[in-house]
Image (spheres, rainbow, N blue to C red):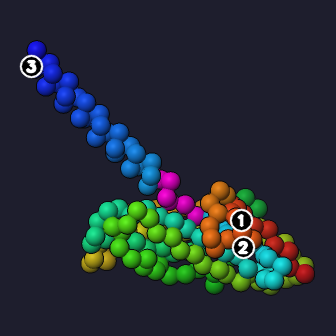
Amino acid sequence: MHRTRLALLFVTIAFAFMAIGQTSALSAEKNLWSTINICGTKKHPHYLGIRGRMPGDGHKSHTMWMKFIAQYKNGTKWLNVNNASTKFRSLGSAEVPWRSDGQTFTMTANKKPATFTFRGLVKFQWRKSNGSVVRSDQRATEAGHPSKQSNPKGYSAATCTMKFK
């Protein structure tokens, strides 16, 4: 009888730890995204804003890094826009639940009139204090992630179409 209770307690504890792990993984996935938060406003008709969020990994000695890339659609392929990319930049310690950042690019067209469909690609890195990468990931922009930095308020999209006259 005592062994049965002990075994039951062990199984209960094991399932609790598994559930916590699944919750942490879901929380981390929920906080790993990128979106377009600005797409050609009236005041700034050719601004493309890209925003990203990444989860911390809980390590005080790790830092979080993001890189923003604007892409345009050419047929069925997505190509990087010339001169519309940042370097990786540090967002600080990875001990926090999540961090977010963004970049606004001014888009131009060599030939006019033209219409382009854009998206963003955000690359994420978690690094040790010595600079070595312990994890990396990337996300193309998607809708459903409005932020305080959205313009107009609440705007979040996967792609952005701009006309150049």
Residue depicted at 72% across the width and 69% down the height = 153
Disc 1 vs disc 2: Cβ atoms closer than 8 Å?
yes
Against 18, residue 143 (above or below) is below
| Dot 2 or dot 3, earlier in sequence | 3
Chain part drawn in magenta: 29-34
Against 120, residue 4 (above or below) is above
Q: Which residue is mark 3?
A: 2
Q: Residues within 10 Å of mark 1 (few under 14, many from 20)?
A: some
Quarter of the figure with the N terminus = top left
Q: CA distance from mark 2 to mark 3?
A: 63 Å
Q: What amino acid is found at the position of numbered circle 2 in the picture?
A: Asn
Which x, y percent locates residue 20? 34, 44
Which x, y percent locates residue 60? 28, 70
Q: Residues within 10 Å of mark 2 (few under 14, many from 20)?
A: some
Is 110 situated left or right of 6 in this image?
right
Q: CA distance from mark 1 to mark 2?
A: 6 Å
Quarter of the figure with the C terminus = bottom right
Which x, y percent locates residue 78? 67, 65
Disc marking residue 155: 1
Residue depicted at 72% across the width and 73% down the height = 151
Q: Which residue is mark 2?
A: 151
Q: CA distance from mark 1 to mark 3?
A: 59 Å
Q: What amino acid is found at the position of numbered circle 3 in the picture?
A: His
